[in-house]
Image (cartoon, helix red, strand yellow):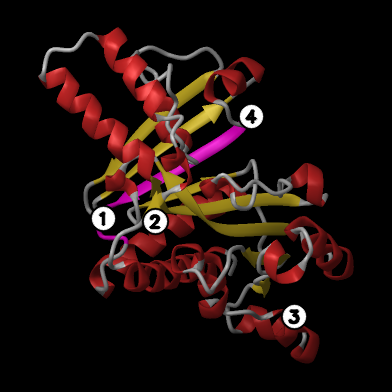
Amino acid sequence: MGKLNMPRTDLALEARETFPEDDVEIQGVLLKEEYNKKRDVKVTTVTIKDERGSKAMGKPIGTYITIEAANLDVKDESFQEPIAKEVAKYIRQMAGEVSGKEILVAGLGNREVTPDALGPQVVDNLLVTRHLKEEYGEEFLTKNKMGNISAIAPGVMAQTGMETSEILKGIIQETKPKLVVVIDALAARSVSRVNKTIQITDTGISPGSGVGNNRKALNKESLGVDTIALGIPTVVDAATIVMDSMEQFMQGQGFKEQEINQFTSELGEQSMRNLFVTPKNIDEAVKQISYTVSEALNQSFV
């Protein structure tokens, strides 16, 4: 049913779940699931191997690691410390060997809009160290177990008049990092994954894609350097919530699948497509998640 009226989502895991044959392998797509009971974290890796898989999933070829943690937005160090360690493990796995090499972290989004302020807040909490190498030498970083990290919160086009890709290209040309890590807020299909999920991918990201406001993609092809994207869903498309509720109601009333599909398809065309929903505690959630993500990044590149 989901294939007829694909709900909006930035998560590869949710795109995979829209296929009714959940237990059947999609050609060109691999799925691997793990659960860390000690840390109460579920990790799902979706690997899109070729063009067939890319076309089926509607996403670029690459690896998508989704970390689901029910306590991600809870203000409690006993939860946040193990989650940060788990996230750091997968960031290092995705990044490969970057020890001692310069990393550029870009916190995307508009810090004046709370659900979109995740990237800038991560940068605010990040331990930036590139200037210390310039001042004290590389041995200082090694001795103090620090990575070589620089960071920027480039804002959005309405604030700067420039594409994020243009800003980052200029910085990359001057500072020559070996890896770019972009942080951005995403949109989820499921309310249960909002503020509870982190997606890490080597395919890059299109700024603003979560709210249907796509800008030029940020990836290795466009930036000329290895790029990892780390995103957290902070909003859900309002139409998706309504359609899910109506679908469940109509199923309970005995409507046929074809009738439900026709109704939800027509509903999806309404102006509600421009509305997004975020939790009422979004201020505190974004603040907490940004701290956890920045801690994970600090641990990843020592």
Residue at 34% over, 66% down: 282
Pick the residue in front: 136 or 169. Answer: 169
Location of residue 87 by image quarter: bottom left
Gap between marks 4 and 2 measured at Cα: 24 Å
- Residue 121 point in image, percent of width and height: 51, 74
Q: Earlier in the sequence, mark 3 or mark 1?
A: 1
Q: Which mark is residue 138?
A: 3
Say which residue label 1 marks.
39
- Count all numbered tags in the image, as a single digit: 4
Say which residue label 2 marks.
86
Q: Earlier in the sequence, mark 4 or mark 1?
A: 1
What element does badge 4 sit on? Answer: loop
Q: Quadrant of the C terminus?
A: bottom right
Do labels 1 and 2 touch, CB within 8 Å? yes
Mark 4, residues whose alpha carbon is within 10 Å: few (<14), some, or many (≥20)?
many
Q: Quadrant of the N terminus?
A: top left
Q: Is 99 on the left or on the right of 172, as rendered?
A: left
Q: Amino acid at mark 1?
A: Arg
Q: Earlier in the sequence, mark 4 or mark 3?
A: 4
Mark 1, residues whose alpha carbon is within 10 Å: few (<14), some, or many (≥20)?
some
